[in-house]
Amino acid sequence: MVGGDAIFLCRHQKYRQVRLCDDTKITGELKSANFGVTGNVGIRYQHNRNFFYIEAGGNYDFIAVQQIDAHGSNRIGAASVMAGYAFSFF
């Protein structure tokens, strides 16, 4: 990489030079809808009227987000962990 430029190789194209600081609009290359699964599991510990809790979960999409396979085939997924203390006011 020299002067902020990079060279990328695509399966269906020759080498092409792309500036890393250029803006690229890719919204037309992405699918407008997706389908996936999400799930969470957690536990809580009662302390008087309040409680501590911890929860873990994640999600995964079954459909690749790109419309054209030449641009790659990526699926979106994430994992999360949440912990806290819940107060009871009443």
Image (cartoon, grey):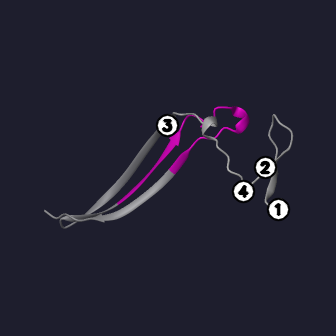
Nearer-N-terminus badge (3/2): 2
* Front: mark 3 or 4: 4
Quarter of the image holding residue 42? bottom left
Residue identifier under label 4: 21
The structure residue drawn at horizontal position 44% and vertical position 42%, both measured from the top left corner, is 38
Quarter placement of the N terminus: bottom right
> Residue 57: image x %, image y %?
44, 50
Q: Please, what secondary structure does the residue beneath circle 2 have?
A: strand
Q: Disc 1 versus disc 4: distance between alpha carbons?
A: 10 Å
Q: Which mark is residue 3?
A: 1
> Residue 40: image x %, image y %?
40, 48
Residue identifier under label 3: 36
Q: Which mark is residue 14?
A: none
Nearer-N-terminus badge (1/4): 1
* Front: mark 3 or 2: 2
Residue identifier under label 2: 18
The structure residue drawn at horizontal position 33% and vertical position 56%, both measured from the top left corner, is 43
Quarter placement of the C terminus: bottom left
Q: Is residue 86 left or right of residue 68?
A: left
> Residue 17: image x %, image y %?
83, 48
Q: Disc 1 versus disc 3: distance between alpha carbons?
A: 41 Å
Q: Please, what secondary structure does the residue beneath circle 1 have?
A: loop
Task: Give the extent of the magenta segment.
Answer: 54-78
Nearer-N-terminus badge (1/3): 1
Residue type, label 1:
Gly
The structure residue drawn at horizontal position 18% and vertical position 65%, both measured from the top left corner, is 49
Residue type, label 3:
Gly
Q: Disc 3 versus disc 4: distance between alpha carbons?
A: 33 Å
Magenta-drawn stretch contains 66: yes
